[in-house]
Image (cartoon, rainbow, N blue to C red):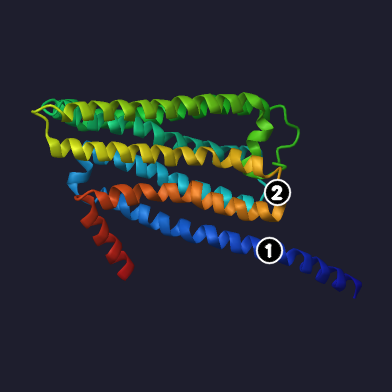
Amino acid sequence: MLTVSRSNITAVFQYPDFLRIMIISTLTTFPSCVFLFINGTMLFTLRSKPVFHETPRYILLYNLLFAETVQLAQSQLLFLLSVSQVKLFYPVCGVLLFFTSLTTVISPLTLVVMPLERYVAVCYPLRHATIITIRNTVVGVIVTWAVSSVNILIRGLLVVKVLLKLENVNVKDHCNNIDILLGLNTDHYDKAFTCVIFVSAAVAIIFSYIGVVAAARSASADKGLARKARTTLLLNLVQLCLSLCSTIYRPLLTALSRTVTMTAFSWIQNVFYVCLVVLPRFLTSLIYGLRDQTIRPVLMYHLCCRCLK
């Protein structure tokens, strides 16, 4: 009887935590699954017709959306592991975080290339077909992944140096907090690299926007193309700001964890995760898919048919 009573008492104390985990997991997993479905449909759309994989700007958009979709799936996995308080080995946790870092860098790097493509289209329309070719676009995509991979390699060397000194290979805290253990070296490197990437993307967008505005004032410029290019560049800037939101998610939570209770922190973490991580990854499909006159009818067709099925 004593054993049964203790078990019942333990179950009573664990039930609120279990209920909280179930509610938070549901509130985050449901929108993530919906957004992953829409992003997946968008990726399928961009491979459904020759015009999409034979046009440089659609190739760049596919690369951007692919990175955002993979990052959304990885972020949801890490979030569920964190909420469920699942502890992993450092090597496993490190691999998950490295893949997350890989796709996180791809988005701003792609936003360095996309504005330059629009700049050439407006300012050098006669040379656009010879400069922005399929081959050059693919090379640009490969370069973005190569730069991101080099970043992961350097960061991995810093992490391995720290892990070799550990006596226990089990993560004491959640997988998202592994960087706390790795010290200031990786923290300083990550901040410096992130600043360089985002500043480069911002400079590319601003430079392209100024060039497009200047070109639009000339008599020989295509006014309609210049107007669409300005709108696209502004959307690129919005997308860059959305990507920047995901970089402040973890520092913001770290600061809040020191000032609020654990219960309040769990709900705040849920809200911030949906607003700063999940939603920005979905807005790429929404912004570009519904705005583009070529993509929109094909995307709506696939979405409607899949929903009906």
Identify residue for label 1. Answer: 18
Closer to the N terminus: mark 2 or mark 1? 1
Residue 130, percent from left and from top: 15, 26
The N terminus, quarter of image: bottom right
Q: Amino acid at mark 2?
A: Val
What residue sits 49% from the left and 29% below the top?
A: 194
The C terminus, quarter of image: bottom left
Left or right of 141 on screen, residue 71? right
Instruction: Identify the element where label 2 is drawn.
Output: loop
Residue closest to the eye, 255 or 40 = 255
Categorize mark 2 by other alpha carbons within 10 Å: few (<14), some (14-19), many (20+).
few
Residue 5, percent from left and from top: 86, 72
* Quadrant of residue 304 within the rendered picture: bottom left
Whole-number angstrom distance, CA of label 2 to CA of label 1:
21 Å
> In the displayed image of the protein, which residue is found farthest to the right?
2
Q: Is residue 309 visible?
A: no
What residue sits 46% from the left and 44% below the top?
A: 71
> In the displayed image of the protein, which residue is found farthest to the bottom?
1
Residue closest to the eye, 55 or 128 = 128
| Vertical order, 194 against 289 (above or below) | above
Identify residue for label 2. Answer: 260
* Quadrant of residue 252 within the rendered picture: top right
What residue sits 40% from the left and 37% below the top?
A: 240
What residue sits 33% from the left and 52% below the top?
A: 286
Q: Is residue 121 visible?
A: yes
Residue 301, percent from left and from top: 24, 61
Instruction: Identify the element where label 1 is drawn.
Output: helix
